Amino acid sequence: MMKSLLPAALVASTLAIAPSAMAASSTDSTAIDGTYLLVQNNESQRVLALKPGGSASLISQGQQVRGYTSGLGAWALTGPDSARVTIIDFNDPADAVNGNGASQLVFDMAFSDVVDGQFQSVSGHLSGKAFAKGQNPLAEDALPARTFGTRFDGMRVGVN
């Protein structure tokens, strides 16, 4: 009797563990964690670092010319091969009409081309809002001085 119950118990325990193992893999960010060079058509390139634990940092080649700072923020998985990143930076344009306070940048990213368990390519859309000095860019009722957006493609920065 015990011998006949053993296979059934093994199958039952495997089925009970399988959903939790699948859930863990759908929240595993190790394939995405890393630094990416984002290239926009006819615009500045950006370097975006997605760090384990959900923090992010951004630097752009256009920040000195256009008058904004590097940015810091957070990111989260939106699917097994996608993520959303929110970055806050600060602006100092030539005129206040374009928003001389903080900006909120949102990157919706889709990853592809897995090599050794890490995504090598990314594409997506950046949408941004620039706010007047003193406005909270995270407040839902804050009205931006301007909005902007662009598409990008990119690749993981690796060690050669």
Image (spheres, helix red, strand yellow):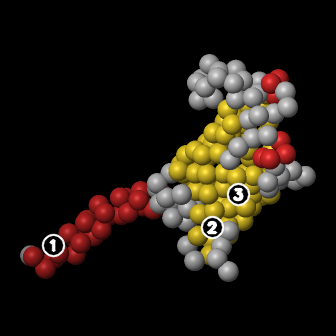
Disc 1 designates what residue? 5
Which residue is nearer to you in this view: 12 or 101? 101
Q: Nearer the viewer, mark 3 or mark 2?
A: 3
Label 2 sits on a secondary structure element that is: strand
**x and y percentages locating residue 28 in the rendered image:** 47, 60
Q: Residue at x 46, y 54 (%)?
A: 53
Q: Which mark is residue 47?
A: 3
Q: Residues within 10 Å of mark 3 (few under 14, many from 20)?
A: many
Report if the CB atoms under discs 3 and 2 are less than 8 Å apart.
Answer: no
Q: Amino acid at mark 3?
A: Val
Q: Is residue 96 above or below residue 69?
A: above
Q: Is residue 19 above or below residue 125?
A: below
For marks 1 and 2 on the same chain, the one whose residue lies earlier in the sequence: 1
For marks 3 and 2 on the same chain, the one whose residue lies earlier in the sequence: 3
**x and y percentages locating residue 141 in the rendered image:** 62, 19
Please state if 36 lies on the left or on the right of 22 as rendered.
right
Q: Residue at x 78, y 46 (%)?
A: 63
Which residue is nearer to you in this view: 118 or 40? 40
Q: Amino acid at mark 1?
A: Leu
Image quarter hosting the C terminus: bottom right
Which residue is nearer to you in this view: 121 or 128? 128
For marks 3 and 1 on the same chain, the one whose residue lies earlier in the sequence: 1
Q: Which mark is residue 119?
A: 2
Q: Amino acid at mark 2?
A: Phe
Q: Which mark is residue 63?
A: none
Label 3 sits on a secondary structure element that is: strand
Which residue is nearer to you in this view: 27 or 135? 135
Image quarter hosting the N terminus: bottom left
Label 1 sits on a secondary structure element that is: helix
Q: From mark 1 to mark 2, how far is it between C-alphas? A: 43 Å
